[in-house]
Structures are given as structure tokens and as C-alpha cells.
Amino acid sequence: MNPTPTHLLATALACLLAVPAAIAATPPEDQATFQQYFKHRFPTVPLDEFKNGSYAIDPIGRENWEAIEEFPPYENAISNGEIMWNTAFANGKTYKDCFPDGPAIESKYPYWDSDRGMVVTLPLAINECRAKNDETPLKYGKGPIADLLSYIAFQSRGQITNVVIPNDDPRALEAYEKGKHFYFARRGQLNFSCAQCHMGNSGTTLRTEILSPAFGHTTHFPVYRSKWGEMGTLHRRFSGCNKQVRAKPFKLQGEEYRDLEFFLTYMNNGLELNGPGARK
């Protein structure tokens, strides 16, 4: 019999921690187990340091990163995003009309939209704003949307990740469970899961790279990656990971990646947002 999504996190963590499995029946229990795993795996790392990804556990990499942060490669993206935020659409309205609390709104996303029965991410909301104002949608992986997200992320620095999963809508829990299943499911020709690299093997070296802990993965996007030579979104990174294990990637901002973001960001609740970021 195949394991249900509800069993996956507790079972996987139990195997990784070599302790008896206790079925995590609720998202809060999942979250506590997830975060405790990383506290156990990296006992000398202060909790708030996990927002810095691999640089929380790699002293040499951190030195290089801190040097880069003195003249961060995402500065132009922030500037471009600020211009986009303040530039009126053809109808005279701006993003502020869609996001009156903006631009420091990153901590509000992703969220469960009970009216539509779906997870809404910030990039999706941006393009829905554009459609509402008769503007063409932006591509989700890079380019202008990454610039706008960079500005929003910069303005949102210091906010705390706080994804809410409503307990009065079973569809929200289903979306969360789908995201959890995605995270622990093996896929591709290499038969790897997200958890194998970023939980069980976090802190170990793959070729010349230290695998970053999953706890902290959502805090710093969008990112400038040296590999890309440009800014990229979280879903671009999801797609790249799928390609690396030789699996067919899903559509950016499709249900699969939005549910994955819902789960993974919820696992990171309590961490400070510190995007945009710079990574190798």
C-alpha cells in the first residue's frame, strides 16, 4: 500500500532522526517536527540564522557571500522594481490600487483563497492585478516580475513568515498535503526527492556545493544566482531542481508549484524575510 501524504513527513523525519515515527496529523505538528529536525541536525546554528540558507552552515561560503552583499548584484533589480511599482498603467492606476498595503506585502503570501479554492502566491496576484488593469501578464521565471518582486521583498525585509492554513476549509488542508507529497516524492530519472537533498543530506557536499537546509529556503527570494547571471523567482528554482533530477518540470505558478510553495513556506513560519538574495 502506498503511504498517504499525511504519513510522509513524520515517517521521513523519523527515518532521518532514527526515532520512532509519530504520525503528524496536523500542519502545526508537521511544522514542529520539521523545524526540530533542523535544530537537531545543526545544534550550533541559531534559529534566526537559518534564513541565510547554506551560509548559516558554511563559514567559507559565508565570507564570500558577505563580501558580495557589500555591493549586491540585485540592486538594479530593486531599482527597476520600484520604478515599475510607481509607474501608472495605461488606465492611470498603479500596483498600489491592487495592493493598498504595499509595497511591503510579502509576508501576506502565499495564502489560501477560500472563495476560489486555491493557493494564491504573490507573482500570481501581480499578474491578476495586471489583467484587471488590461495589462499583459509578465513571465513568471525572470525579467520584470523578478524586478518587481525584488522591490517588494526589499521593502518587506524584517517581516516574519506566517502562512496560515485555515482549519475550517478541507480544501486548504488538501492543497497543503499535495505540497507535502510533492516535497517527499521521488521523481525523475535520478529518483530523488526535494527532501533527500535538503533534509537528509543538508550540510553535506555535492560536487563543490554544500546542500542548504530546507528550513530557510523561502525567505530570500527572488535571488540573483551567479549560475543564472540574473534574478530568478522561487518557481524558477523549483523548475531547475526538477530538471537537475531529470524530471519534467511543471508550469510556473501552476497548481503543483503553488501547493509546494504553500507547504514549504508554512514549514518556514517564524523566520524573518530577508530577500532579495544572492546565491551561487
Image: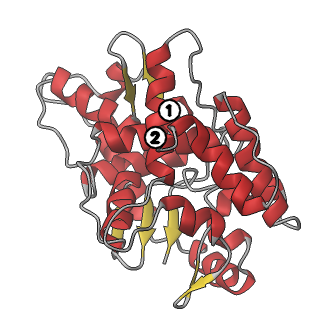
| Residue 16 in the image, given as x and y percentages of width and height | 71, 62
Q: Badge 2: how crowded within 10 Å, few (<14), some, or many (20+)? A: many
207 above or below 136? below
What's the amino acid at mark 1? Tyr
Residue 40 to residue 96: above or below = below
Q: Who's the residue at 70% across and 59% down the image?
A: 15
| Numbered mark located on residue 179 in the image | 2
Q: Residue at x 63, y 32 (%)?
A: 162
The residue where tag 1 is placed is: 176
Comparing 259 with 87, the one in front is 259
Quarter holding residue 118: top left
User: In which image quadrant can residue 75 be found?
Assistant: bottom left
Q: Secondary structure at mark 1?
A: helix
- Check the image and report above or below for 241 versus 206: above
Observer-nearest residue: 109 or 205? 205
The Cα atoms of the two marked residues, 2 and 1, are separated by: 5 Å
